[in-house]
Image: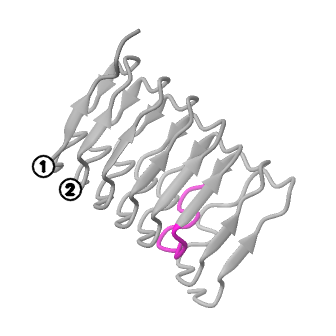
Amino acid sequence: SYSGLQYIRLPDGLTCIDAWSFKGCTGLRDVAFPKTLTKISWGLLKNALGCGILTVRGVTTVYPHAFEGCISLQSVAFLQSLTTVRFSAFEGCASLQSVSLPETVTVIEFNAFQKCTSLQGTTLPKGVTKIGGRAFAGCVSLQSIVLPETVVQVGEGAFEGCPGMNVREPMRD
């Protein structure tokens, strides 16, 4: 465990970081991702992130378990380029209240946001075509989600265990 590590500034030009690199860095409060980073690897910050807000630019894929168990993460915003949120990427981020995904996202895989118990609502971008099974299962605070008309597949149990949730379709032009 690297509990003393509080801040990481990754250099410009960096495109890839090996899997599990910062797993268990429980004291970590802030990570500055360079805009050249194209993927957030398997388990990169699993059980690590102590900071509340994360903004990411340039990443196309968030790999499995990347932020799983980051219990202090409250908000995440992907500003451009992201196409896929892989399985269990944010699973168990109990404090996560808000997620902002860009229009480039097409797939949210199974368990991607499972057990994000503080997530209250979100609007999925127009490009999303697939929501995997159990993608939002156990998000007990989830009250509303807006599904774009581009969604053609919703996996089994995608919203299971979301007792107060209301699924809405967007207004059509």
Neighbour tally class for label 1: few under 14, some 14-19, many 20 plus, Cα within 10 Å: few
The foreground one among 12 and 123 is: 123
**Pointer 2 and pointer 1: residues touching (CB < 8 Å)?**
yes
Residue situated in front as seen by the camera: 94 or 21: 94
Q: Residue at x 56, y 67 (%)?
A: 45
Residue at x 52%, y 40% (from the top left corner): 101
Q: Give the dominant element type of the magenta stretch: helix, strand or loop.
A: loop
Give the amino acid at mark 2.
Val
Q: Amino acid at mark 1?
A: Pro
Q: Position of residue 112 (x, y in %)?
A: 39, 48
Picture layout, residue 125 above or below residue 121: above
Q: Dividing the picture into quarters, in which one does residue 150 lie?
A: top left
Location of the C terminus by quadrant is top left
Q: Which residues are magenta?
A: 41-52
Q: Is residue 47 magenta?
A: yes
For the residues labelled 2 and 1, the Cα–Cα distance comes to 6 Å
> Which quadrant holds residue 103?
top right
Left-right relation of 139 to 73? left
Most distant residue in the top direction: 173
Residue at the image point whose x is 52% and y is 58% from the top: 66
The residue that disc 1 covers is 163
Q: To which quarter of the image does residue 61 belong?
A: top right
Q: Where is 6 relative to 140, above or below?
A: below
Along the viewing direction, whichever of 111 and 81 lies nearer the viewer: 81
Residue in the picture at 40% in, 53% down: 88
Q: Earlier in the sequence, mark 2 or mark 1?
A: 2
Q: Which mark is residue 140?
A: 2
